[in-house]
Image (cartoon, rainbow, N blue to C red):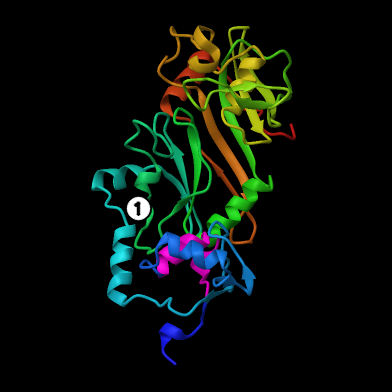
Amino acid sequence: MSDTVRVQMRAVSDDEAGLRLDRWFQRHYPALSHGALQKLLRTGQVRVDGKRVEGKDRVEPGQTVRLPPGVSAPPPAVVAAVAVKERPVISERDAAEIQKLIIFQDDWVIALNKPSGLAVQGGSGTERHVDGMLDGLRFGSEIRPRLVHRLDKDTSGLLLIARTSQAAKRLAESFRDRETEKLYWAIVVGVPPKREGAIDLPLAKRPGARDRETMQVDHEEGLKALTHFREMDRAGRRAALLALWPRTGRTHQLRVHCAEMGCPILGDRKYGGEAGELTTIADPRKLYLHARRITLPHPSGKGELKVQAELPPHFRRTVEAFGFATTGDRESE
């Protein structure tokens, strides 16, 4: 019986962990159109481990994909052409720039110390961003590294990049299941009402805002947002250095929470307005929020991954100008 009339079974490989099923088909069967795949899924002709699935479902290593008659693998030349098409061209300048940001690297993970002003993903008017530079982190691998979380464009600090599909899956699970402890440092204008505590204020997108990522406290429609904080040092009542632990991952959570405490993050005109400026001592073009440290289970399943990012120059200069002591960011203290 020929391949065109025989049901086939194909196993998912280790480097395809967490890949969407429709992307899996795009990778292996590029001649199969999206519409044709959706019809096969709707009629149950494509199954994973014998179960009906949707294109958005994710596959795992060792699972078996049932391929109906008529679906056949393309010639090797076509597979090679698709692989080349999937690999964007990156300039030597961009590759060198993103490689200079590496502060930790192993077979599973790359950690970057992202500068303020560099976007993580593209958007309207954003041409240069981390996601567009990830091919500079392949280091000879056929697998393109993947983003597993994000930082605001103006926030500096730790950004984790998964080097394999399996690493991406496990890191995503750690973020989703709140097995990750994230520490941020912020310089705020004014001082918090108490030296340490929790900010528990639900957040929702601000309706009608020109910037679709503008958030506000909304006790009726907002999603739970919880932040723990500790004051590390202060300069009278003019400014303070805070350690912040976000327990949830809402958009602009730390920025809104600090503003609601009455001490907006320095340089945050969106939520602090003019009250968020100290132009005589700080660069008004910068946001003084830094993703300082991250701790989570290592995606290999062995031990713990703990990485710390040094302060960027603008943040360090302002800390020194205020004479802030940079201790006291341990939760057990």
Residue 322 position, x and y percent, is: 52, 14
- Name the residue rendered at 69%, 48% in the picture: 177
In-image side of 95 versus 265 (left or right):
left
Q: Is residue 78 visible?
A: yes
Looking at the rendered structure, the secondary structure element under dot 1 is helix
Residue 279 position, x and y percent, is: 44, 8
In-image side of 332 versus 306 (left or right):
right
Rendered position, 279 above or below 215: above
Residue 97 lies in quadrant:
top left
- Name the residue rendered at 44%, 37% in the picture: 114
Region in magenta = 11-28
Extreme residue toward the bottom, this view: 1
* Total tally of numbered discs in the picture: 1
- Name the residue rendered at 27%, 74% in the picture: 77
- Name the residue rendered at 41%, 63% in the picture: 26
Crowd tier of the residue under label 1, counting other residues whose Cα lies within 10 Å: few below 14, some 14–19, many 20 or above:
many
- Kind of residue at badge 1: Asp
Q: Is residue 121 magenta?
A: no
Rendered position, 216 above or below 39: above
Residues 310 and 41: in front is 41
Q: Quadrant of the N terminus?
A: bottom left
Residue 169 position, x and y percent, is: 57, 57
Q: Is residue 18 magenta?
A: yes
Q: What residue is pinned by disc 1?
A: 135
Extreme residue toward the left, this view: 92
